[in-house]
Image: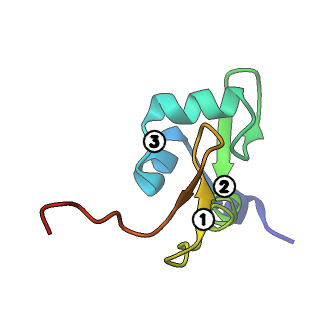
Amino acid sequence: METQNEVGSSLMDVKGVSALTGLSIGTIYHWVSQKRIPIVRFSARCVRFRRSDIDKWIASRVVAPIEEGRFVRDRDGQRRSTRKQSSCNE
């Protein structure tokens, strides 16, 4: 079991998460309001982030590259190839 000092040292504030992720502070607050990022809530206005939770959250968002020649769907749901398009100038 973690002691109080270990728990306190593993908690980060919004600035710490911003520095770790490269996300803006505003984005982090927005994602907190949407429950898109794991938090520890002490009160309505006081939130902290466990470093271990943030590390797992980041790891869960790693996307493997798509193999060349495969098809993906774009935002409009249209199927498109991942192959590079040849141009007339080549």
Position of 22 with respect to 71 (left or right) is left
Mark 3 vs mark 1: give the one in front. 1
Mark 2 neighbour class, 10 Å CA radius: few under 14, some 14 to 19, many 20 or more? few
Relative to residue 30, is residue 6 depicted above or below? below
Q: Which one is in front, 68 or 65?
A: 68
Element type where label 1 sits in the image: strand
Determine the CA span between mark 3 and mark 1: 39 Å
Q: Secondary structure at mark 2?
A: helix
Mark 3 sits on what residue?
A: 15
Res 62 seen here: no
Amino acid at circle 2? Gly
**SS for tag 3?**
helix
Res 87 label = none
Q: Residue furthest top?
A: 44
Q: Residue at x 71, y 40 (%)?
A: 36
Judge the density around disc 3: few (<14), some (14-19), many (≥20) Cα neighbours within 10 Å. few
Mark 2 or mark 3, which has the lower sequence index?
A: 2
Q: Amino acid at mark 3?
A: Lys
Query: Residue 68 placed where, x, y %?
Result: 49, 77
Q: Is residue 25 left or right of residue 79?
A: left
Q: Which residue is mark 2?
A: 8
Look at the image and tell me whether residue 83 can be seen. Answer: yes
Q: Quadrant of residue 66?
A: bottom right
Mark 2 or mark 1, which is nearer the start of the sequence?
2
Q: Nearer the viewer, residue 80 or 13?
A: 80
Q: Amino acid at mark 1?
A: Phe
Residue under numbered circle 1:
71
